[in-house]
Amino acid sequence: MATGDNNLKPSGRYSGDEWKSEVEPEGDYERRRFERSAEGQEKNRREQEMVRRFLRNLPIGSRVLDVPAGMGRFTELILQSGHQPMSVDLNFARITEARRRASKPVPAIQGDVTQLPLADQSVDAVVCFRLLHHLTPEMISKVLVELRRVAPRAYVTFYSRHTVKFLKKHLRGKTVSGQYYAPGQLIQWARAAGWDQCQHESPLAVFQILHSLDLQK
C-alpha cells in the first residue's frame, strides 16, 4: 500500500537532529494561521468542532494531554468541556504563550512528543492535532507507541490520500505540501503500536484533507 510521497522525510520542527534542542524565537504561528483571515478562522472553527466531538466522549474530569499544543489553541475548549488540560510542545516560546493565555493555571511544559516527560498511563486521553503529516512512517510509529504509553485513548489527525485534493494533485504530477497517508496504513501502524480500537472518524470526507483517528486500547 502506498504511504506517501516517494521522498519521505520529516519537516518543520522534526526535520533534523537539531530539532530536539532548537527553539523558535516567536510564538506567533497560530495567530498568523488561524486568526488573521476569514479562511483561517473558519478552519479553526471546524477543527475546534473536531476536537469537541472527541472530548464529548470522555468522562467528565478527564486529564487530557494536548501535544503538540502550540500556543494552547485547544486549552479553553478542554476546560469548557469539563476536563483537565495539560499542554506539551517542543517550542519553548509557544508553550510559554500557551501558559500565559490560559484562563486558569494549567500544566504547560516543553517536551518531545517521541519522549514525553510523563509517567506511564499518567493521563486519560491525548489530543495530537496537526502533527502526523509532518512525519515519516518511522516517526509516526514512534509517536503512536509513545501516546499509547502515556494514555489509554488518543485522538490523532493526518492528511488522507483518499481525498479529492490529493488525487487531483497526484494525477497532475503536482507537489503536495506535507505527507499524505492512506487511512488503512495509519490504522495498521496504530494497531502495531498497541491500539486495539482504531476508529476512522472521517472516512467520507473526501473534500477535506485533514482526517482523524480515535484510538483506544
Image (tube, helix red, strand yellow):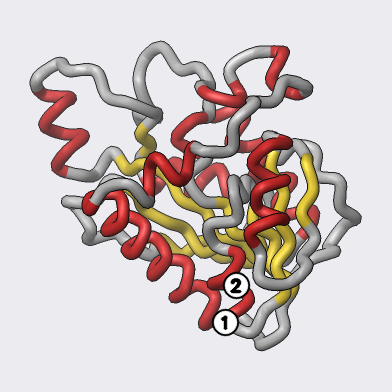
Give me the C-alpha separation between circle 1 and circle 2.
Answer: 5 Å
Residue 70 location, x and y as percent?
59, 46
Mark 1 and mark 2 in contact? Answer it, CB < 8 Å: yes
Residue 87 location, x and y as percent?
70, 55
Residue 21 falls in which quadrant of the image? top right
Residue 89 falls in which quadrant of the image? top right
Q: Is residue 217 visible?
A: no
Q: Residues within 10 Å of mark 2 (few under 14, many from 20)?
A: many
Amino acid type of the residue that numbered disc 2 sits on in the rendered structure: Ile
Q: Residues within 10 Å of mark 1 (few under 14, many from 20)?
A: some
Residue drawn at 66 percent across, 87 percent down: 60
Q: Which numbered disc covers residue 78?
A: 2
- Label 1 belongs to which residue? 81
- In the image, 39 versus 100, the foreground residue is 100
Residue 132 location, x and y as percent?
51, 39
- Callout 1 secondary element: loop
Q: Is residue 184 visible?
A: yes
